Amino acid sequence: MPDFHLFAKGPRPVAPFSHAVETDGWVILTGQMPTDPDAPDAPLPDGIAAQTRRVMDNLALILAELDLDLSHVVQCRAYLTEFERDYAEFNDTYKSYFPENRRPARTTVGVTALAVGALVEVDCVAKRP
Protein backbone atom coordinates (compact mmCIF):
# COMPACT_ATOMS: atom_id res chain seq x y z
CA MET A 1 0.00 0.00 0.00
CA PRO A 2 1.44 3.42 -0.89
CA ASP A 3 2.33 5.98 1.78
CA PHE A 4 1.22 9.55 1.01
CA HIS A 5 3.40 12.27 2.55
CA LEU A 6 2.57 15.92 3.15
CA PHE A 7 5.11 17.71 5.35
CA ALA A 8 4.49 20.80 7.47
CA LYS A 9 8.04 22.03 6.68
CA GLY A 10 7.53 21.53 2.94
CA PRO A 11 6.43 24.16 0.45
CA ARG A 12 2.72 24.89 0.59
CA PRO A 13 1.06 22.86 -2.19
CA VAL A 14 -0.36 24.97 -5.02
CA ALA A 15 -2.90 22.23 -5.87
CA PRO A 16 -4.42 19.15 -4.20
CA PHE A 17 -1.46 16.74 -4.01
CA SER A 18 0.99 15.06 -1.66
CA HIS A 19 4.63 16.17 -1.50
CA ALA A 20 5.63 12.55 -2.10
CA VAL A 21 4.19 9.10 -2.51
CA GLU A 22 6.21 6.05 -1.51
CA THR A 23 5.71 2.43 -2.46
CA ASP A 24 8.07 -0.56 -2.47
CA GLY A 25 11.13 1.62 -1.82
CA TRP A 26 10.33 4.03 -4.66
CA VAL A 27 9.63 7.65 -3.76
CA ILE A 28 7.86 9.85 -6.29
CA LEU A 29 8.11 13.57 -5.55
CA THR A 30 5.54 16.00 -6.88
CA GLY A 31 6.91 18.74 -9.10
CA GLN A 32 8.18 21.61 -7.02
CA MET A 33 7.65 25.27 -7.72
CA PRO A 34 10.11 28.05 -6.85
CA THR A 35 8.12 29.10 -3.80
CA ASP A 36 9.72 29.77 -0.43
CA PRO A 37 8.54 27.25 2.18
CA ASP A 38 9.05 29.86 4.90
CA ALA A 39 7.20 32.62 3.03
CA PRO A 40 4.78 30.98 0.60
CA ASP A 41 3.17 34.26 -0.46
CA ALA A 42 6.49 35.99 -1.20
CA PRO A 43 7.26 36.89 -4.81
CA LEU A 44 9.08 34.21 -6.79
CA PRO A 45 12.84 34.64 -7.22
CA ASP A 46 13.91 36.58 -10.29
CA GLY A 47 15.32 34.64 -13.23
CA ILE A 48 15.75 31.01 -14.17
CA ALA A 49 18.91 30.40 -12.09
CA ALA A 50 17.33 31.63 -8.86
CA GLN A 51 14.08 29.79 -9.53
CA THR A 52 15.96 26.58 -10.36
CA ARG A 53 17.91 26.83 -7.09
CA ARG A 54 14.69 27.27 -5.12
CA VAL A 55 13.04 24.31 -6.90
CA MET A 56 16.03 22.05 -6.29
CA ASP A 57 16.26 23.19 -2.66
CA ASN A 58 12.55 22.38 -2.25
CA LEU A 59 13.10 18.89 -3.67
CA ALA A 60 16.04 18.42 -1.28
CA LEU A 61 13.87 19.58 1.63
CA ILE A 62 11.17 17.00 0.82
CA LEU A 63 13.80 14.27 0.43
CA ALA A 64 15.32 15.21 3.80
CA GLU A 65 11.90 14.83 5.44
CA LEU A 66 12.02 11.24 4.14
CA ASP A 67 15.61 10.69 5.40
CA LEU A 68 16.86 10.77 1.80
CA ASP A 69 18.88 13.23 -0.26
CA LEU A 70 19.56 14.06 -3.90
CA SER A 71 21.98 11.12 -4.17
CA HIS A 72 18.91 8.84 -4.05
CA VAL A 73 17.31 10.48 -7.08
CA VAL A 74 17.27 8.28 -10.18
CA GLN A 75 15.13 10.36 -12.53
CA CYS A 76 13.99 13.97 -12.95
CA ARG A 77 11.57 15.75 -15.25
CA ALA A 78 11.95 19.47 -15.78
CA TYR A 79 9.44 21.87 -17.32
CA LEU A 80 10.51 25.28 -18.66
CA THR A 81 8.16 28.03 -19.85
CA GLU A 82 10.92 29.77 -21.83
CA PHE A 83 12.78 26.73 -23.16
CA GLU A 84 14.97 28.39 -25.79
CA ARG A 85 15.94 31.28 -23.54
CA ASP A 86 16.43 29.37 -20.28
CA TYR A 87 17.64 25.86 -21.16
CA ALA A 88 21.40 26.52 -20.95
CA GLU A 89 21.20 28.54 -17.72
CA PHE A 90 18.82 25.97 -16.21
CA ASN A 91 21.37 23.23 -16.99
CA ASP A 92 24.22 25.21 -15.43
CA THR A 93 22.29 25.55 -12.18
CA TYR A 94 20.76 22.05 -12.19
CA LYS A 95 24.06 20.23 -12.67
CA SER A 96 25.52 21.88 -9.55
CA TYR A 97 23.15 19.70 -7.49
CA PHE A 98 24.51 16.39 -8.77
CA PRO A 99 28.09 15.11 -9.08
CA GLU A 100 29.13 14.53 -12.69
CA ASN A 101 29.33 10.76 -12.18
CA ARG A 102 25.93 10.57 -10.42
CA ARG A 103 23.43 12.47 -12.54
CA PRO A 104 19.87 11.10 -12.71
CA ALA A 105 18.14 10.30 -15.97
CA ARG A 106 16.26 13.41 -17.07
CA THR A 107 13.68 14.73 -19.47
CA THR A 108 13.23 18.46 -20.04
CA VAL A 109 10.30 19.90 -21.93
CA GLY A 110 9.04 23.33 -22.86
CA VAL A 111 5.54 24.21 -21.69
CA THR A 112 3.24 27.16 -22.26
CA ALA A 113 2.69 27.95 -18.57
CA LEU A 114 3.24 26.70 -15.01
CA ALA A 115 1.37 27.29 -11.76
CA VAL A 116 2.08 30.51 -9.85
CA GLY A 117 3.74 32.03 -12.95
CA ALA A 118 6.91 29.98 -12.43
CA LEU A 119 9.61 29.66 -15.09
CA VAL A 120 10.55 26.12 -14.00
CA GLU A 121 9.15 23.06 -12.25
CA VAL A 122 11.03 19.83 -11.51
CA ASP A 123 9.72 16.51 -10.23
CA CYS A 124 11.73 13.41 -9.46
CA VAL A 125 11.80 9.75 -8.52
CA ALA A 126 14.10 8.48 -5.77
CA LYS A 127 14.94 4.95 -4.64
CA ARG A 128 15.56 3.94 -1.06
CA PRO A 129 18.83 2.02 -0.57
Image (cartoon, rainbow, N blue to C red):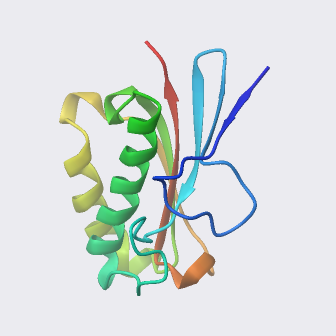
Residues 108 and 19: in front is 19
Q: Is residue 94 above or below residue 42?
A: above
Q: Residue at x 24, y 60 (%)?
A: 93
Residues 15 and 100: in front is 15
Residue 63: image quadrant is top left
Quarter that holds the N terminus: top right
Q: Where is residue 27 shown, x and y percent of the image?
A: 57, 30
Query: Viewed as shown, does residue 110 lie left or right of 56?
Result: right
Q: Is residue 56 above or below residue 119?
A: above
Residue extending farthest right:
1
Q: Is residue 129 above or below residue 23?
A: above
Q: Residue at x 38, y 37 (%)?
A: 64
Residues 50 and 13: in front is 13
Q: Where is residue 38 shown, x and y percent of the image?
A: 39, 68
Residue extending farthest front:
8
Q: Residue at x 29, y 55 (%)?
A: 94
Residues 65 and 60: in front is 65
Q: Where is residue 120 shown, x and y percent of the image?
A: 46, 70
Quarter that holds the C terminus: top left
